[in-house]
Image (cartoon, rainbow, N blue to C red):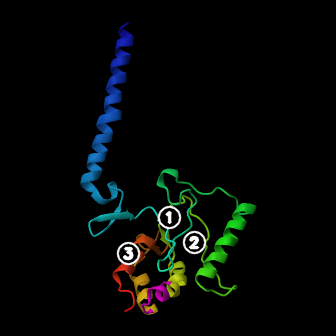
Amino acid sequence: MLQLKRSLLVFVWLTVLCGLIYPLAVTGAARVLFPALSGGSMIKHGEAIVGSHLIGQQFTRPEYFHGRPSAVDPPYDASNSGGSNLAPSNAKLIAQVKNRVHYVRTENNLAAATSIPADLVLTSASGLDPHVSPAAARLQARRVAQKRKIPLTDVENLIKQNTEEALWGIWGKERINVLKLNLALDVVKIGN
């Protein structure tokens, strides 16, 4: 009976320590030391939260830059994160990529031989990637400038201004957060 009592006390003590005290301490420390990161890295436009630095959004209107395709359904649903898990030789993946290449070329009025950056036709491992490469943004720049009736050079400057460098110049590649770029576009007056 004594061992049962000790076991129950240890169980209760560890449950309170590991299930309540530790998570609250870590969460509290994170809120104090990293308030933006621990709050989901939210992006605000004025006072309204419009998205996160960490999760992509689907843009379909031609006057906006489009991000990577999402591998989840509905698109960019963070509760359903994951890649397509289709092998490069999978017929379904090959058909999807061909359709996406055709769509990108048609939407951007590109010649059939134009090379398309992989990040415009392939999903990321999470299916939620909010970034595109500078090459993917530049490929869309002419369409966006024409639809917004602004000079191409203004759009190209916004791309440069919103390009994020590799972490410490070492890890990762240059990238552009599509939501932030589109928000910067919305500040530029249409039809200057």
Q: Distance between the residues labelled 3 and 2?
A: 21 Å
Q: Name the residue under label 2.
A: 119
Q: Write down the quadrant of residue 163 in the picture.
A: bottom left
Q: Which residue lies furthest to the left in this view?
A: 32
Q: Residue 165 in the image: state x and y as whole percent.
A: 43, 75
Which three-letter amino acid code belongs to the residue tagged 3?
A: Leu
Residue ID at (34%, 62%): 42
CB within 8 Å, label 3 to label 2: no
Q: How many marks?
A: 3
Q: Name the residue under label 3.
A: 183
CB within 8 Å, label 1 to label 2: yes
Which three-letter amino acid code belongs to the residue tagged 2?
A: Asp
Q: Main secondary structure of the magenta part?
A: helix
How many other residues sit within 10 Å of disc 3, few (<14), some (14-19) or many (≥20)? some
Looking at the rendered structure, which numbered label has been put on residue 129?
1
Label 1 sits on a secondary structure element that is loop
